Image: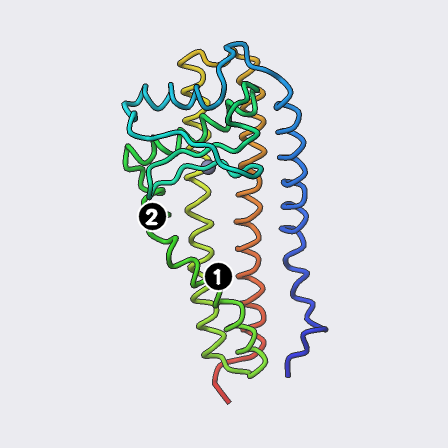
């Protein structure tokens, strides 16, 4: 029998929970700090994104404004770069860093960067995986059905693979961002250091999410091992 209230395997997740809390605090405070520092060039993030995109011949990609906080993203399906309210019209180092990062994703798309293509391909499957994996697994655990638990684990592997492929996509977009900001002289050397801090803090949230998924898999395997082999 499985007693959910005595399930101590959730303790396996503790390092990931701590890391993601720390990453959340870190991105908020770093972003806030560099949101108050204007870049010397005076261009707003949206103007700069436009300029950087044009530099790559990506005049066809519009730069749009989107509501919310830290909702900035490049949409590879619609080929649109969207910057959030606090970034779009700002000329802060943080906003410039974010705009260049999203431009980095557009450039990945242009160059056919493999991890991005893999990520786009797994996205539709991941939705199903993240909805079904946990219910399948824990119902399987309650019913002592190794088959259902295995099915839950297989769906969860889809979720984990998404996190594993997201990590290089994000790190590469930030590396491209810092390179293009440097080569176009959009930021000075000391401003670049600030932008790097913002992008590193953002990357930590992806590292934390990946660690969480990895440890969650370990936890599922531990629980699965406790149930044993056959359906009964
Ligand atoms: Zn990104």
What residue is at 32 percent from the left and 44 percent from the top?
Answer: 117
The local secondary structure at tag 2 comes to: helix
> In the figure, 107 relative to 224: above or below?
above
The local secondary structure at tag 1 comes to: helix
Residue positioned most to the right: 6
> Do tag 1 and tag 2 residues touch (Cβ < 8 Å)?
no
Spatial CA span between label 1 and label 2: 17 Å
The residue nearer to you, when weighing 215 against 57, is 57
The image position of residue 113, as x and y in percent, is: 31, 37
> In the figure, 48 relative to 218: above or below?
above
From the image, tell me which residue sits under label 2: 118
Q: Is residue 140 left or right of residue 48?
A: right
Q: Is residue 208 left or right of residue 52?
A: right
Mark 2, Cα crowd under 10 Å, few <14 / some 14-19 / many 20+, is some
The image position of residue 124, as x and y in percent, is: 37, 56
Dividing the picture into quadrants, the one containing residue 172 is top left
Q: Earlier in the sequence, mark 1 or mark 2?
A: 2
Q: Is residue 15 left or right of residue 157?
A: right
What residue is at 58 percent from the left and 26 percent from the top?
Answer: 197
From the image, tell me which residue sits under label 1: 130
The image position of residue 159, as x and y in percent, is: 46, 57
Dividing the picture into quadrants, the one containing residue 218 is bottom right
What residue is at 64 percent from the left and 59 percent from the top?
Answer: 12
Mark 1, Cα crowd under 10 Å, few <14 / some 14-19 / many 20+, is some
Dividing the picture into quadrants, the one containing residue 47 is top left
What residue is at 64 percent from the left and 20 percent from the top?
Answer: 36
Residue positioned most to the bottom: 232
The image position of residue 191, as x and y in percent, is: 56, 15
> In the figure, 64 relative to 37: above or below?
below
The residue nearer to you, when weighing 13 against 43, is 43
């Amino acid at each position: 029998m499985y007693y959910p209230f005595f399930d101590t395997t959730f303790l396996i997740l503790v390092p990931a929970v701590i890391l993601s809390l720390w990453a959340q605090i870190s991105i908020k405070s770093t972003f806030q700090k560099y949101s108050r520092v204007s870049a010397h060039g005076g261009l707003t993030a949206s103007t700069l994104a436009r300029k950087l995109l044009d530099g790559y011949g990506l005049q066809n990609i519009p730069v749009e404004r989107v509501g919310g906080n830290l909702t900035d993203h490049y949409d590879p399906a619609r080929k649109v770069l969207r910057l959030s309210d606090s970034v779009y019209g700002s000329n802060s180092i943080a906003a410039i860093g974010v705009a260049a990062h999203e431009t980095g994703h557009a450039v990945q798309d242009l160059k056919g960067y493999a991890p991005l293509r893999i990520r786009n391909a797994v996205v539709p499957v991941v939705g199903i995986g993240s909805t079904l994996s946990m219910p399948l697994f824990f119902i399987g655990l309650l019913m002592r059905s190794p088959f259902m638990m295995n099915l839950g684990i297989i769906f969860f592997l889809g979720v984990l693979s998404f996190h594993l492929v997201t990590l290089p996509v994000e790190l590469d977009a930030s590396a491209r961002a810092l390179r293009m900001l440097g080569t176009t002289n959009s930021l000075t050397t000391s401003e670049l250091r600030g932008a790097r801090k913002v992008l590193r803090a953002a990357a930590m949230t992806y590292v934390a999410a990946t660690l969480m998924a990895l440890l969650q898999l370990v936890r599922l395997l531990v629980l699965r091992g406790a149930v044993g082999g056959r359906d009964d």
